[in-house]
Each structure stands twice: as structure tokens, then as C-alpha cells.
Amino acid sequence: MIRQTVLRVTAKLLIPYMLLFALYVQFHGDYGPGGGFQAGVIFAAGFILYALVFGLQNARRVARPALLEGLIALGVLIYAGTGIATMLLGGNFLDYNALNPEHPSQGQHLGILLVELGVGITVAAVMISIFFAFAGRERSS
Amino acid sequence: MRSLFAAVMLTGIYSFLGACWMLTLDAPDVAFTEAAVGAGIATILMLGTLALTGRQAKPPAHAPWLPLGVVILTGAALVYGTLDMPRFGDPQAPIQRYPTPSYIERNEREIQVPNAVTAVLASYRGYDTLGETMVVFTAGIGVLLLLGGRRRRRRQDGA
């Protein structure tokens, strides 16, 4: 679809703002609507739009499948690692108060930020991977 | 209607309408998810599947009366179920009495995050969200294993 001028130009205009909006939803989730899952999905949608317009090969060059597989695991590791860290600091699993015992609410803010980051990374990588897996298959005759 | 392409488009439109309902019900978090996943990514994945399989549904072998009866019965049961539900926005409804108010009150003291939804999801219900992340993780690994992106890429490189 790269030859379609309208699609190409519109996609080029939209994709940076989609990715930026995803980051906004990710890191502004404490204050406004949204959070890790929504941010990950919007981020993935930006990549999928890129792949639809500019071709799967180009998108694969940006988001290499090996990198995506690593990111899928990394998000879950960040989430579970936050829980392990709170245990090592003397709290319960995922008890963010332990991250900052003097100011529990700040510990909570940090914990929520880390956990949402983990969710966002995993969701974005999984959605892009699933799309690549579907779109990369050739039609079986 | 045999055109699967039209069916996929209608599903996408329905998801988008669902997102609008969520928004009018003051649930922008859910509306985001519905618009991005239901109307966006799921539609694209179904279109990708159509590109692999075909655009037309096979004509059914049987008359549609049995499925129609099942659908009507299920719909009637669901409508009957709604008769027992509390009135929309009723402050005495169970969901408004427990445990939502306690979370909203405790959030102001304990977490102090302006968006109470985030506080519940990531902190009070942190285990559940970890479980959901594991579900997404497992789904991704499963699709990658089944559709085998990795193996085929190696074959292409070797060729």
C-alpha cells in the first residue's frame, strides 16, 4: 500500500502521535484514564499501522522478532521482579509500601509505575508478535 | 450474509459502538481497550485470517432453525436475567456498597493516586493484574509456537 499517497502521508503523520499518545497513556495512567494495557495496545496499533502501509518486511526491520520475544518476557520479569524486590525489602509480594517505608504513598507510586511499565511492554510486544505471526503466513493452497 | 469481509467489518463497528457506550458510562479505561483491541487489532487479525482462508462462508448444510431457536432461547434467558438487576445508577446496588467505596476511601489515605482505577488494578488487585499479564504472555508464546514465525524465518535465511 506504499504507493497510495493519501494512505502513506496520513500514516506518516499519525504514527508518531500514536506512539507519543501511547507513552502518555502509559505514564499518565496514575492521573488520567489508561494504564499499561491500554498503552501497550495503542503502541502496538501504531506499529501495525506502519506494517499495513509500509509492508511487513520494513516493520520487521524496526521490531525484530527476536527483540519482541525478549520484550514479551521482560515485561513479565519487571512485574514479578517488582514483587520480588518488595519481598527483599521486607514487605509482602507486591507490597509497594516497602519500596519507600518513610513515605508509603511514594513507594506505591513507584511500584504502580514499574508494574504498569511491565504490563505495557508485554502487551505491546505480544500484540505486535501476534500480528506478525498472522500476517507473515503465506496462504496454504 | 455469506461475505465474511462484511461480517468482520460489522464486528469492528459493533466494537466501536461498544467503546462509545463505555465512554458514556464514564469508563474511559475500558473504552480505550475496547476501541484499540476490539475495533482495531482484533479486526486486523480477523482480516489477516480472511486473507489466508477466503472471503466467502460455505453455505450451511442444515436449515438454520435449530441455531435460531438456541439463540432466541439464550437471548430470552439473558433478558429475563436483567429483570433481577438493580436499577441503573442505583446507590443501593451491591456493586456500589462493597467493596468499591472502601477502595476509594483507602486510596485517598494509602496510595494517593488520582485515578482510583489504576490504584485498584495495580496495587489492591496487583496479584490479579500479574495473572492477567501472565495470560497475555502465555497467549503470545502460544501463538508464536503454533504459527512458528521463528522456524520459517530460519528456513528463509538458509535458502
Image (spheres, coloured by chain):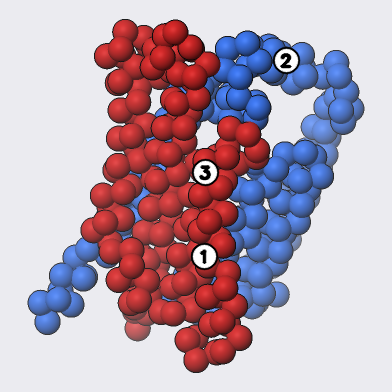
**Percent of width and height locating residue B35:** 65, 55
Residue marked by disc 2: B101
Residue marked by disc 1: A16
What residue sits 45% from the left and 18% below the top?
A107
Which colour represents chain B? blue
**Percent of width and height locating residue A41:** 51, 52
What residue sits 82% from the left and 33% below the top?
B82
Amino acid at circle 2: Pro
Give the number of the disc on residue B84.
none
Q: Quadrant of the N terminus of chain B?
A: bottom right
What is the chain identity of the residue bearing mark 3? A
Q: Residues within 10 Å of mark 2 (few under 14, many from 20)?
A: few
Measure the C-alpha gap from mark 3 to mark 1.
Answer: 15 Å
Amino acid at circle 1: Pro
Q: Which chain is red?
A: A
Q: Is residue B75 above or below residue A49?
A: above
Amino acid at circle 3: Gln
Q: Secondary structure at mark 2?
A: helix
What is the chain identity of the residue bearing mark 1? A
Residue marked by disc 3: A26
